[in-house]
């Protein structure tokens, strides 16, 4: 449910880029801490309906006419996700078996992704197509950027290659934003249309998902800012030639 922050602290990194990376790492840690504290807080608020996260997810799927998606439990804290390949809503233990407002919010959000998949939501489809490219770029980008920074004055093309790889991950982070916001919108709209939550509980669910969304916003902004920094370094090296 929470994204990875694609920032690196590497030897030879220019001070400006290093400071920017440290700044966003700090912001990301702060937002992640706030998200975890919110989910722990709302995880102590019992859901009026008494349904567990698993039951909330199954009900939302049925209400949306989806019967080929399985709800299963996976290890980890906030490790919840929807897998479009095997059509499973994967819920962490704190969500799967919990009858809390936080559990209901997370379950509804992940089922929002299942609804997106069933309706061929264009941004989810595009993100899925980018996954193979992102997997390749993520495994190479750190080393290519490191080599590019160290050799920028003699072989700037290597840094350009790193920039292209990093741009792929940045594009993925940007495309993820509408996917995540829309999944929360769908989940919250469904929760609001049912009798599962009174207004007070709904407000807490909305707050929890807002903080979850902010982790994706921080990751996307950090990726854009870092990409711009590397582009400026590359352009500076080219201008010195």
Image (cartoon, rainbow, N blue to C red):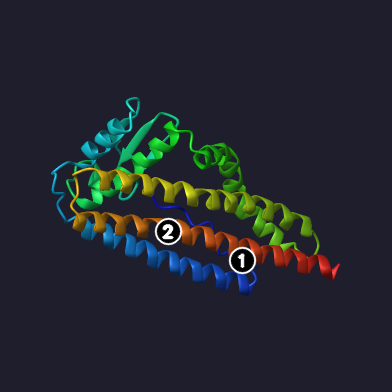
Task: Residue 112: give x, y in percent of width and height.
Answer: 37, 41
User: Relative to 61, does residue 159 appear above or below in the rendering?
Assistant: below
Task: Residue 12: give x, y in percent of width and height.
Answer: 65, 68
Q: CA distance from mark 1 to mark 2?
A: 27 Å
Q: Residue at left 28%, top 37%?
A: 60
Mark 1 vs 2, N-terminal side: 1
Q: Residue at left 22%, top 60%?
A: 41
Q: Quadrant of the C terminus?
A: bottom right
Residue that carries the numbered disc 1 in the rendered image: 11
User: Relative to 39, does residue 129 appear above or below in the rendering?
Assistant: above
Q: Residues within 10 Å of mark 2 (few under 14, many from 20)?
A: many
Can residue 80 be seen here? The reply is: no
Task: Residue 73: give x, y in percent of width and height.
Answer: 28, 37
Would residue 36 appear left or right of 160 to someone viewing this image?
left
Question: Which residue of the protein is positioned furthest toward the top in this rendering?
Answer: 68
User: Relative to 61, does residue 145 appear above or below in the rendering?
Assistant: below
Can residue 51 be seen here? The reply is: yes
Q: Secondary structure at mark 1?
A: loop
Q: Secondary structure at mark 2?
A: helix
User: Relative to 104, does residue 23 appear above or below in the rendering?
Assistant: below
Would residue 128 appear left or right of 181 to someone viewing this image?
right
Marks 1 and 2 close (CB-CB < 8 Å): no
Task: Residue 188: give x, y in percent of width and height.
Answer: 31, 48
> In the depicted view, which residue is nearer to us: 229 or 184?
184
Q: Quadrant of residue 14?
A: bottom right
Q: Quadrant of residue 10?
A: bottom right
Q: Which mark is residue 223?
A: none
Q: Residue at left 28%, top 49%?
A: 105
**Disc nearest the viewer among 1 and 2:** 2
Q: Residues within 10 Å of mark 1 (few under 14, many from 20)?
A: few
Residue that carries the numbered disc 2 in the rendered image: 215
């Amino acid at each position: 449910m929470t994204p990875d922050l694609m920032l690196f602290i590497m030897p030879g990194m220019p001070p400006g880029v290093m400071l920017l990376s440290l700044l966003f790492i700090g912001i990301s840690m702060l937002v992640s801490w706030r998200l975890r504290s919110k989910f722990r807080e709302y995880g102590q608020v019992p859901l009026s309906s008494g349904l567990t996260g698993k039951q909330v997810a199954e009900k939302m799927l049925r209400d949306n006419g989806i019967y080929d998606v399985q709800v299963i439990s996976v290890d980890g804290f906030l490790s919840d996700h929807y897998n479009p390949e095997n059509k499973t809503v994967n819920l962490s233990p704190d969500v799967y078996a919990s009858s809390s407002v936080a559990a209901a919010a997370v379950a509804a959000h992940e089922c929002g992704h299942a609804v997106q998949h069933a309706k061929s939501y264009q941004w989810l489809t595009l993100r899925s197509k980018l996954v193979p490219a992102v997997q390749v770029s993520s495994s190479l980008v750190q080393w290519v950027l490191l080599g590019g920074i160290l050799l920028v004055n003699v072989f700037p093309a290597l840094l350009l290659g790193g920039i292209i790889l990093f741009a792929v991950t940045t594009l993925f982070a940007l495309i993820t934003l509408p996917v995540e916001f829309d999944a929360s919108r769908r989940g919250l709209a469904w929760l609001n249309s049912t009798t599962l939550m009174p207004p007070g509980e709904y407000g807490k669910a909305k707050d929890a998902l807002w903080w979850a969304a902010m982790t994706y916003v921080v990751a996307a902004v950090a990726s854009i800012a870092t990409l711009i920094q590397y582009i400026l370094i590359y352009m500076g090296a080219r201008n010195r030639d």
